[in-house]
């Protein structure tokens, strides 16, 4: 097997696929890329068994066939090469030779027949969806998904359908993010997409200007855009009824400048305990006062002007969660809503948009 | 007491780093002797009950070979006429805080390393005191003696390690000043085990490679030390050569790092049910202290000392901090089951809770907080505070939180509520 391709084209393919390849896998071949050439097309495949990605490019084929290369080293090499034509060749010894101009490398490949079979799920019906809208929906929710394996169904983002709108929800139990938008999707059932896989999907979406096509089958989601196709294994699990935990009536409504609120939290958060990150927030007319205490180092205090004329009350928040929820808001102003009986704080963009998130307080 | 240096008020003396290490002599015993003057001059030993170890021995008792950490039984054998006293920590704590208050009057930088020893950073206080620092150190020790009536020894040197080594040379009731520029001449000749941080094991390893004095350690090749002692090796050499000095950490306002309790059993035993009961009791007591201070912990640990003095310690870190009785009990239970694997008699057990944090708990959207557990803890702590620990008992439980009948506990009916009344306790089979 031997083919030639321009370094810039190859690099584009690697930047899209290498992040999917498993970094530390019990299955060594998953840290490799599968390169396959046939019909003047190079296809680069990577998978961690949760997500599979394939990117295809035109190339000059001298001899068709397939090979595998260690993904990260191959990317490092191609990144450093001059922008000229690169030749990749599988030698009789089984080693992969990469050369461009005077530069030459030999890499140890593995048997391409051992590479997991990847299916593009051609039979699945797909819908065209605006890539930017989908990317925005992922961005607004992904941060709230859990990384804690003890509640594995929370390690994913929920895709739901309400009338004509697609709803995406993510939560780790401590906070929740929700967005809804008309993207032309019509889901028959709720779908759970793993957080890690969705990060990979987002990376591909960010590169697409117009539309991507999206398809679902019971266990997989397929995303294709231009020359890239991804299949994502879905999570088989329950998801709690998120509507139940979204408060409907607000008693205290606070309007604040998002940037200044973030700055204030960041300053006070310097002296929170590293592990529980608790900051005490006192809502009082015209301002939010914040204090934090580090058990060994000392205390911090600051306040920020806000629009609020209700009763004074104190809530404790994890500064990290509070900052992330404000960071997921696009607008310059935010509205915070809270009920005196407890429950989550709601963070809305101001003016209101199609998304918001919740943050549960801490308790003494 | 002896000292060098003329104490000139010029030159490097103004800016030279000088640290005083203060260590009260036979602290617990000294306090007892102050409180009970009739004990003065007699061999006095403070320690646990018969099965415990010596916490502190007066110099009169030490003459008979009594040492700290020696089993009390052994001490009784070699010094039968000594006065044996149970520890009175309240009194020791009171004396300790008065001692550190005196130290704090000489410099704001005071580091408390244990109940009876600590460091004072006297750097830059020459002008304040208007006297050479060795004289200031001497005044400080005198003030402890005259105010508290206990003796304290001191070491004044250019680093914490050198100061501590100097104190050990000056004991009892002495002060040793080592001029930082020349202290290595003296400290270098000490056996390597005299340096803090070099334990018995490290000493053996070093001596086997021809490193027998502190001076040898300072001059040893770093690669060899790294091989022998790991990462600590090169640092130990740096400390031995006097080039490294860690700062004096002021303890004011610093939070307690861990909560722990240990108990020696009345006799070595393989009755694991009884040991388990004791472990649970210790865990509950430590948990109550944690709650009383408004703290929570991330790490729960258990130590078991077998009859042959081998120690096995095990700990587990939690996903979130806790101060709940039920959760802490479930942890020690799990640790206990993992630790007790061999059929050897047990001598001592201890529970240590660390990773101390403020008691703030993250609420969950999908698991509403009921408050039941913490209310129960609060009520139980209150009853125990008023009527004694044994008035309320907690049933046995597994790590998953399921309630199971426990051999030493009350009936299951009460245990579902989390506690049982002693009156309702069934006689043990």
Image (cartoon, rainbow, N blue to C red):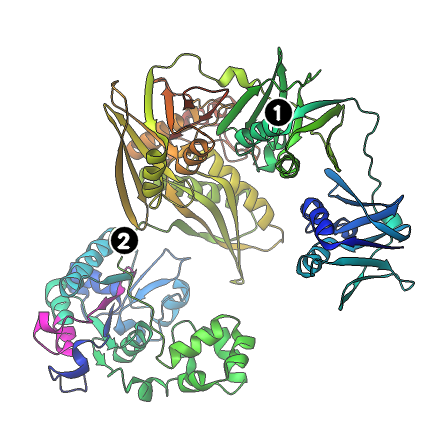
Q: Is residue B400 left or right of residue A322?
A: right
Residue positioned most to the left = B130
- Give the quadrant of the C terminus of chain A: top left
Label 1 environment density (alpha carbons within 10 Å; few <14, some 14–19, many ≥20): many
Observer-nearest residue: B303 or A351?
Answer: A351
| Element type where label 1 sits in the image | strand
Magenta residues, start to end: B113-139
B196 within the magenta span:
no
Residue ID at (83%, 43%): A116
- Callout 2: chain: B
Specify the quadrant of the image occupied by residue A210: top right
Labelled pair 2, 1 in contact (Cβ < 8 Å): no
Query: What is the x, y in percent for residue B232?
Result: 47, 71
Q: Mark 1 = which residue?
A: A158
Do discs 2 and 1 belong to a common subunit? no
Which of the chains bears the disc numbered 1? A
Mark 2: secondary structure: helix
Q: Considering depth in this image, is A120 or B331 the residue closer to the camera? A: A120
Residue B89 image label:
2
Q: CA distance from mark 2 to mark 1?
A: 58 Å
């Amino acid at each position: 097997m031997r083919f030639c391709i321009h370094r810039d084209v190859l690099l584009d393919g690697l930047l899209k696929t290498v992040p999917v390849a498993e970094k530390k896998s019990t299955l060594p071949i998953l840290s490799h890329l599968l390169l396959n050439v046939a019909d003047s097309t190079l296809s680069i495949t990577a998978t961690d068994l949760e997500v599979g990605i394939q990117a295809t490019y035109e190339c000059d084929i001298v001899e068709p066939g397939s090979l595998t290369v260690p993904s990260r080293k191959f990317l490092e090499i191609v990144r450093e090469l001059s922008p000229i034509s690169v030749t990749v060749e599988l030698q009789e010894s089984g080693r992969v030779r990469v050369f461009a101009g005077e530069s030459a490398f030999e890499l140890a490949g593995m048997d391409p027949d051992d590479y997991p079979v990847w299916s593009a799920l051609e039979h699945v019906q797909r819908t065209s969806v605006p890539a930017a809208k989908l990317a925005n929906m992922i961005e607004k929710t992904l941060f709230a998904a859990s990384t804690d394996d003890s509640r594995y169904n929370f390690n994913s983002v929920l895709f739901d359908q309400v009338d004509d709108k697609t709803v995406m929800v993510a939560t780790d139990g401590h906070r929740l993010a929700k967005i809804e938008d008309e993207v032309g999707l019509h889901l028959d059932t709720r779908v759970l997409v793993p957080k890690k896989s969705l990060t990979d999907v987002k990376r591909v979406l960010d590169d697409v200007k117009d539309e991507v096509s999206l398809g679902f089958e019971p266990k997989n989601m397929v995303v294709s855009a231009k020359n890239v196709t991804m299949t994502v294994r879905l999570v088989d699990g329950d998801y709690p009824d998120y509507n139940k935990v979204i408060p409907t009536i607000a008693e205290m409504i606070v309007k604040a400048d998002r940037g200044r609120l973030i700055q204030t939290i960041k300053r006070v958060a310097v002296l929170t305990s590293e592990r529980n990150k608790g900051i005490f927030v006192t809502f009082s007319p015209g301002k939010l006062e914040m204090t934090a205490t580090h058990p060994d180092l000392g205390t911090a205090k600051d306040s920020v002007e806000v629009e609020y004329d209700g009763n004074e009350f104190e809530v404790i928040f994890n500064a990290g969660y509070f900052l992330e929820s404000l960071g997921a808001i696009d607008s310059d102003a935010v509205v915070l809503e809270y009920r005196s009986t407890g429950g989550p704080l709601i963070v809305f963009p101001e003016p209101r948009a199609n998304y918001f998130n919740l943050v549960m307080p801490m308790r003494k | 007491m002896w000292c060098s240096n003329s104490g000139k008020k010029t030159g490097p003396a103004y800016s030279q780093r000088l640290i005083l290490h203060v260590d009260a002599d036979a602290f617990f015993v000294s306090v007892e002797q102050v409180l009970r003057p009739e004990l003065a001059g007699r061999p006095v030993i403070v320690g646990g009950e018969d099965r415990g170890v010596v916490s502190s021995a007066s110099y009169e008792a030490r003459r008979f070979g009594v040492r700290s950490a020696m089993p009390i039984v052994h001490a009784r054998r070699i010094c039968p006429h000594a006065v044996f006293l149970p520890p009175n920590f309240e009194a020791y704590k009171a004396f300790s805080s008065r001692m550190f208050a005196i130290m704090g009057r000489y410099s704001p930088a005071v580091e408390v390393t244990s109940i009876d020893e600590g460091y004072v950073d006297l750097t830059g206080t020459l002008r304040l005191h208007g006297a050479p620092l060795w004289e200031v150190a001497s005044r400080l020790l005198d003030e402890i003696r005259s105010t508290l009536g206990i003796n304290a020894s001191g070491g004044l040197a250019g680093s914490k390690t050198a100061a501590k080594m100097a104190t050990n040379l000056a004991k009892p009731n002495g002060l040793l000043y080592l001029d930082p520029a020349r202290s290595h001449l003296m400290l270098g000749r000490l056996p390597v085990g005299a340096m803090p941080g070099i334990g018995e094991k490290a000493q053996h390893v070093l001596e086997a490679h021809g490193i027998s004095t502190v001076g040898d350690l300072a001059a040893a090749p770093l690669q060899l030390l790294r091989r022998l002692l790991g990462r600590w090796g090169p640092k130990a050499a740096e400390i031995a050569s006097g080039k490294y000095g860690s700062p004096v950490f002021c303890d004011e306002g610093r939070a307690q790092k861990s909560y722990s309790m240990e108990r020696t059993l009345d006799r070595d035993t393989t009755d694991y049910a009884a040991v388990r009961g004791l472990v649970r009791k210790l865990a509950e007591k430590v948990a109550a202290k944690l709650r009383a201070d408004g703290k929570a912990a991330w790490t729960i640990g258990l130590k078991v000392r077998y009859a042959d003095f081998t120690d096995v310690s095990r700990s587990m870190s939690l996903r979130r901090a806790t101060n709940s009785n039920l959760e802490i009990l479930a942890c020690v239970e799990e640790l206990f089951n993992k630790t007790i694997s061999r059929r050897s008699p047990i001598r001592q057990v201890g529970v240590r809770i660390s990773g101390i944090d403020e008691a703030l708990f993250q609420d969950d959207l999908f698991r509403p907080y009921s408050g039941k557990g913490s209310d129960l803890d609060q009520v139980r702590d209150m009853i125990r505070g008023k009527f004694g620990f044994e008035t309320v008992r907690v049933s046995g439980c597994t790590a998953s939180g399921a309630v199971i009948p426990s051999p030493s506990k009350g009936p299951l009916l009460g245990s579902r509520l989390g506690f049982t009344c002693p009156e309702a306790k069934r006689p043990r089979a």
